[in-house]
Amino acid sequence: MRGAARAGGAGDRARPPVRSACGWWLLVVWSLRLASGGLCAPRTRGRLQCLQVSVFANRSRARTDGLARLGELQVYGWRNGSDSIRFLKPWARGPFGEGQWDELQRLLSVYRGSFTRDMHEFVKMLRLAYPFEIQVSAGCELRPGNTSESFFHAAFQGKEIMSFQGTVWVPAPDAPYWVGRAAKELNQDQGTRKTLQWLLNDTCPQFVRGLLEAGKSELEKQVRPEVWLSTGPTPGPGRLLLVCHVSGFHPKPVWVMWMRGEQEQRGTQQGDILPHADETWYLRVTLDVAAWEAAGLSCRVRHSSLGGQDIIIHWEGSHSSMWLMLVALLGSLLMIGCLALWYRRRRSLNTTGDLHIVLDPISDLLNKKWEWGPL
Ligand SMILES: *[C@@H]1O[C@H](CO)[C@@H](O)[C@H](O)[C@H]1NC(C)=O
Ligand SMILES: *[C@@H]1O[C@H](CO)[C@@H](O)[C@H](O)[C@H]1NC(C)=O
Ligand SMILES: *[C@@H]1O[C@H](CO)[C@@H](O)[C@H](O)[C@H]1NC(C)=O
Ligand SMILES: *[C@@H]1O[C@H](CO)[C@@H](O)[C@H](O)[C@H]1NC(C)=O
């Protein structure tokens, strides 16, 4: 079945890796001068998130990987084994020139080296234990009215321990005691704090504006969803799981609802929005109903690509109800047949004594049971 195949395909496709990343790279962008001209006002809101994951196996073994994404799209990759940033989109260079990227890559390598060395030192100083993992998530998000909001969070063993708030490093409320010490240490470094503010407040949003402009045709593409209905595994006797498949749409925000006329069906269950390989999205929305209630339901899809014209697909339960009717009919026929047979046997038993001897003992037993039973 087409629906099932497409749905399965989307489900199996790996989601973008969450564990791997490029975080502090913003820290070093400061030395790169952004071309100030040619950056237009944002047409789309954008969120640039850089993720860094550093795994320290022991005193001598560590690795740091990174990635950066714009909204849902991964745009950059940064592997421990390589000094170069991988551009995953043709427009990933954004507003930076060749020289600026070269400079950034060089600085990132230096940063990785010193981050690793400093962490080993830190572990020695604070008597922490190996292995451990550090994650950093940093970036900015453009907001309406040419404003932006930035963020910088660090996590240890999967729990947030510290963030940069406006001008200072702040330990997380439930962070271990040593984080307070680390934050104090970091806050004494005025230079880095200033640089970080400049990066987060100015460089990042400007870079994102340039990136949005460079990737506009892909980021703003509008692709209409394809919508079809099917049934899922039956939730129970006399019930149906109606499935509305919405596939191949872009951008991601979408509204899908099972309806009866204009009435939204409250039992509507929405799955995760899953990525297709071609950077469009897939969504499954289900409704568990009594089989007789399925008629008259429809799946309604609202999406920016549809220009205000929702897609409405009506549930035509004809196939399934025809099957149900057929099964019911066959069942009844079978039952009538059995009853007729039994009745005929019973009658022949009562009228002809010699047939009684020919019949096998099971029929005999059946007869007795029937005679003794409540019927
Ligand atoms: C948006 O803000 C930035 C800096 O805050 C400025 O350089 C740019 O000109 C502004 N753009 C518009 C359209 O106001
Ligand atoms: C560090 O870990 C790696 C593998 O995780 C191992 O091969 C190596 O021997 C370890 N080194 C030390 C000093 O424990
Ligand atoms: C990560 O990269 C550094 C520097 O290139 C290297 O020394 C280290 O062995 C790498 N770590 C792993 C686990 O490959
Ligand atoms: C950066 O923005 C924060 C608020 O997010 C503000 O507190 C801080 O003063 C700004 N710093 C600079 C240098 O603009």
Image: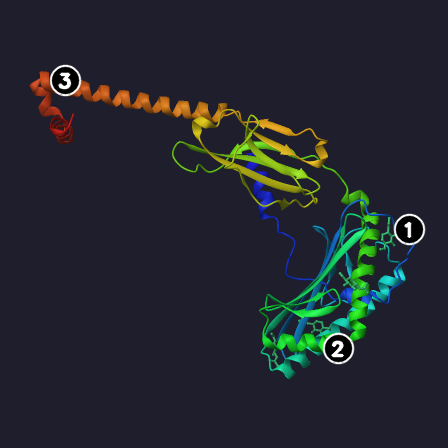
Pair 2/3: label in front: 2
Residue 39 x %, y % = 88, 51
Tag 1 residue: 38
Tag 2 residue: 188
Q: Toward the viewer: 278 or 33?
A: 33
Q: At label 2, which amino acid type do we have? A: Gln
Residue 358 x %, y % = 12, 24
N-terminal of the pair, mark 3 or mark 1, is 1
Left or right: residue 300 versus residue 235 is right
Quadrant of the image occupied by residue 245: top right
Q: Residues within 10 Å of mark 1 (few under 14, many from 20)?
A: few
Q: In 3D space, how far apart are the residues under numbered discs 2 and 3 (Cα atoms)?
A: 104 Å
Pair 3/1: label in front: 1
Residue 372 x %, y % = 11, 29
Pair 1/2: label in front: 2
Residue 91 x %, y % = 82, 51
Ligand 4 location (quadrant): bottom right
Figure disc tally: 3
Q: In 3D space, how far apart are the residues under numbered discs 1 and 2 (Cα atoms)?
A: 37 Å
